[in-house]
Amino acid sequence: MGDGDMSAQAGPETRPGRSARPRRHWPLASAVALALVATTTAVPLVLADSGDDTPCQDVPASTRALAEDPAAATRALDPGADLSRFPAVRKLIVHENPCGDGARTLGAVIEAATRADRPGTAHTVAQARAAHAVVAALESAEVPDGMAPGLARMLADYVVDEIRYLSPSTDAAGPAVTSAQAAPDKSGHTPYGRFLAPGEAHADFEYADPVSGAEPDPDRLIGKVARNPEAFAILYDAARAYFAHYLERLTSRGGDPDDRPADGHRDDTPDTVWPDNDLEDIAERIGALMSHRVVHTRNGEIPDLAAFDRAVRKHTRGAYRPAGQRLTTRPPMGDIADRPVSGPLSGELTDGRHQLLTVLDAWAEARQVPAERAAAMELVVDNAYVRAAG
């Protein structure tokens, strides 16, 4: 468990390919178009129970049954390596206005199809492809409020994959990669993240297929589900849990313990570059959640901010603090999001900057991180959060 030597720091603007986050802005599909998509199969339309004239879509019994049969749900939502089944997946889960408890049921189907079977279990390739298809199908569709918690739990189960998303990439090989494809190279680097669990497949949300229409954007989908306080809490918990998980696996100098010089020769890239990159991504995710909260309030989608915040606190699990020594375990993604809390949350819940920096400072003190390195890490996290929070 020896820690590596401290290397020169790379500034935020010199890190590899991450100085900016380009975002796509796709027009939302019209309600009419979505209704046509949802009804291309024999899904009956009935009037909504609310008394207005908005039609709702009944979720068929065959679809409802998938929520209780994870294996069948995965088969139904797996688009295939070539995404040939993506249109079928989209038809199954895109419902503009499901009747009754249909939205929650669809969320449960999505969870059954994509989440790991039990604690300690890695995702399969089929589950990861299904997660890719779900994000691609729903990021430009109307997401009923009842689906939001289930979608959030799915995204939390892929916390490493969704947080590393930047934008569509031509380097992406497919909707998901095997554990062998995601494994680090000889230098200890992999584009799929640090500290990956052995045997786990990963959804690659940067893979887009314009032919099938599968162009996932988890950032945009998260913006939609964050209008729901339970979903907001799930995503906030997952990002903070990942932050603690990540810190406790770094060296006491804030470096990547798996970084190895290629062919025995150290190049000019310090072992802190990718940790800084990843911590930046986590801080940006939390900052973006706070930004969504503000935007939805301004738009009237969160009509009572105080009530929203109370509901978020009610659903928030607690605080996540890193261990006082470096851990070498590599749990699967689902276990990262579900890690036990360290205790009750202190301070203002929606002050994400405070929540991040107090955890970082406590970790740096416990691990006796050199002051210069700790300050550099704090700057990376602070800048990323403020930039994303707006």
Image (cartoon, rainbow, N blue to C red):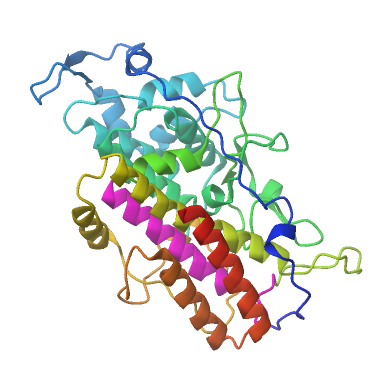
Residue interval drawn in magenta: 228-256
Q: Does the magenta stretch include residue 320?
A: no
Relative to 337, say whether 216 is above or below: above
Q: Can residue 283 be seen in this view?
A: no
Query: Number of marks in the image?
Result: 0
Nearest the eye: 221 or 109: 221
Relative to 332, say whether 10 is above or below: below
- Quadrant of the image for the N terminus? bottom right
Relative to 67, say whether 193 is above or below: below
Residue 225 lies, in percent from the top left, at 35, 42
Residue 77 lies, in percent from the top left, at 44, 30
Q: Residue furthest left?
A: 51
Residue shown at 74% from the left, 79% from the top: 4
In the rendered structure, the answer to whether residue 253 lies left or right of residue 281 reads right
Residue shown at 39% from the left, 27% from the top: 141
Nearest the eye: 249 or 81: 249
Q: Does the magenta stretch include residue 240?
A: yes
Residue 317 picture quarter: bottom left
- What main secondary structure does the magenta stretch of the protein show? helix
In the rendered structure, the answer to whether residue 302 lies left or right of residue 125 reads left
Q: Is residue 31 visible?
A: yes
Residue shown at 74% from the left, 71% from the top: 9
In the rendered structure, the answer to whether residue 348 lies left or right of residue 28 reads left
In the rendered structure, the answer to whether residue 192 lies left or right of residue 223 reads right
Residue 65 lies, in percent from the top left, at 28, 31
